[in-house]
Image: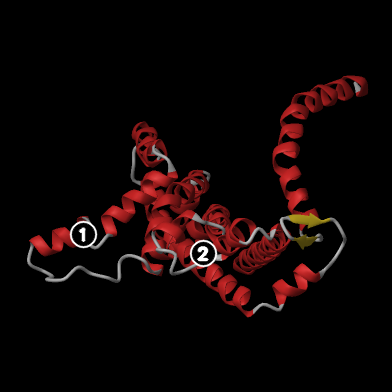
């Protein structure tokens, strides 16, 4: 029996070995390279491979980095709040209001934005929000405004709108999966005990759906904080985020060690905040239980 279990384990390891090795090569190799570069010195058009902590000292002592990092965290948090806040009602509707026969079609419709590239979708939002775009042209033709609205493009509002649309499917799907796993008999028991629909949702549905909400929040927060395209195109370069700062160091200034130190520092900050968020959520659920 033990030998049979051992052979099954060997077969399992042999199956996951190729994708695991590919993941290490594709994911870990670049990260390790950036980590190594962050401890090197920058020379004129070359890299001096001597260990130093000067890059990290410069990063943590730079007030510009502090400002841009805080802005990136704020924008990512706002995008996450808007995206998850809009995604939850959609996921709830799909799980509780749509018939099982039609759920597949609705999920298919949600994935339609993925048929086009992310860059194309960003350009489309630039056309929609532009001074002569769809919104301004429509409002002018209706006589509501005389001059184009300037607050819907090249600012934080436009960045949040674009990123919330781009990452909405990523937030809807994990929340929908969490809602689908909820035992409907628990909701019926709550109503049988005299609870209103609102209190049943607050005490039963929401706590049970929190794993999906947490997953959706992390899925949205982590990539949006490092987004480069949207702040450049939709923000007009007027609202640089941490990815733009890294790009400037890596390419414009050709200072790869400093750019690597910025990237590693940003990753550490995001990782720590994500772990704190998950820990606080677990503590909240324990208190609710």
Task: Specify the label residue 195 is tagged with.
Answer: none
**Residue 29: which quarter of the image?**
top right
- The mark total stands at 2
Residue under the point 34% across and 34% down: 102
Category of crowding for the residue at label 1, using alpha-carbon neighbours closer than 10 angstroms: few (below 14), some (14–19), many (at least 20): some
Task: Specify the label residue 76 is tagged with.
Answer: 2
Q: In which quarter of the image is the C terminus?
A: bottom right
Determine the secondary structure under disc 1. Answer: loop
Of 217 and 229, nearer the camera is 229
Task: Specify the label residue 132 is tagged with.
Answer: 1
Of 126 and 183, nearer the camera is 126
Residue 231 in the image: state x and y as whole percent.
45, 61
Category of crowding for the residue at label 2, using alpha-carbon neighbours closer than 10 angstroms: few (below 14), some (14–19), many (at least 20): many
Residue 231 position (above or below residue 170): below
Residue under the point 81% across and 61% down: 39
Residue 72 in the image: state x and y as whole percent.
54, 68
Residue 169 in the image: state x and y as whole percent.
44, 46
Residue under the point 74% across and 53% down: 34
**Residue 15: which quarter of the image?**
top right
First of labels 2, 1 by sequence position: 2
Of 108 and 205, nearer the camera is 108
Q: Can residue 196 be seen in this view?
A: no
Residue 46 position (above or below residue 177): below
Q: Which of marks 2 and 1 is in front?
A: 1
On screen, residue 248 versus residue 126, left or right, reads right
Residue under the point 75% across and 34% down: 20
On screen, residue 96 versus residue 9, left or right, reads left
C-beta proximity under 8 Å, tags 2 and 1: no
Q: Distance between the residues labelled 2 and 1?
A: 28 Å
Residue 178 in the image: state x and y as whole percent.
52, 48
């Amino acid at each position: 029996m033990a030998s049979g279990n051992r052979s099954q384990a060997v077969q399992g390891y042999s199956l996951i070995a190729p994708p695991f090795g590919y993941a290490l090569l594709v994911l870990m190799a670049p990260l390790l390279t950036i980590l190594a570069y962050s401890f090197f010195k920058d020379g004129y058009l070359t890299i001096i491979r001597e260990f130093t902590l000067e890059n990290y000292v410069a990063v943590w002592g730079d007030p510009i980095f502090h400002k841009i990092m805080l802005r990136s965290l704020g924008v990512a948090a706002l995008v996450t709040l808007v995206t998850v806040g809009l995604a939850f009602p959609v996921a709830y509707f799909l799980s509780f209001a749509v018939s099982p026969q039609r759920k597949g079609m609705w999920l298919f419709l949600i994935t339609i934005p993925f048929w086009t590239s992310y860059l194309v979708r960003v350009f489309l939002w630039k056309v929609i929000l532009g001074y002569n775009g769809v919104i301004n042209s429509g409002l002018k033709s209706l006589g509501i405004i005389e001059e184009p609205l300037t607050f819907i493009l090249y600012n934080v509002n436009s960045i949040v709108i674009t990123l919330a649309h781009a990452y909405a499917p990523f937030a809807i799907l994990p929340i929908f999966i969490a809602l689908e796993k909820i035992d409907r008999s628990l909701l019926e028991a709550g109503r049988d005990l005299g609870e209103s629909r609102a209190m049943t949702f607050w005490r039963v549905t929401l706590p049970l759906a929190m794993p999906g909400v947490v997953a959706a929040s992390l899925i949205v927060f982590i990539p949006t904080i490092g987004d480069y395209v949207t702040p450049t195109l939709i923000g007009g370069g007027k609202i640089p985020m941490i990815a733009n700062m890294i790009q400037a160091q890596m390419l414009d200034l050709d200072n790869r060690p400093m750019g690597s130190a910025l990237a590693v520092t940003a990753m550490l900050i995001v990782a720590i905040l994500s772990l704190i968020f998950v820990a606080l959520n677990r503590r909240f659920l324990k208190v609710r239980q």
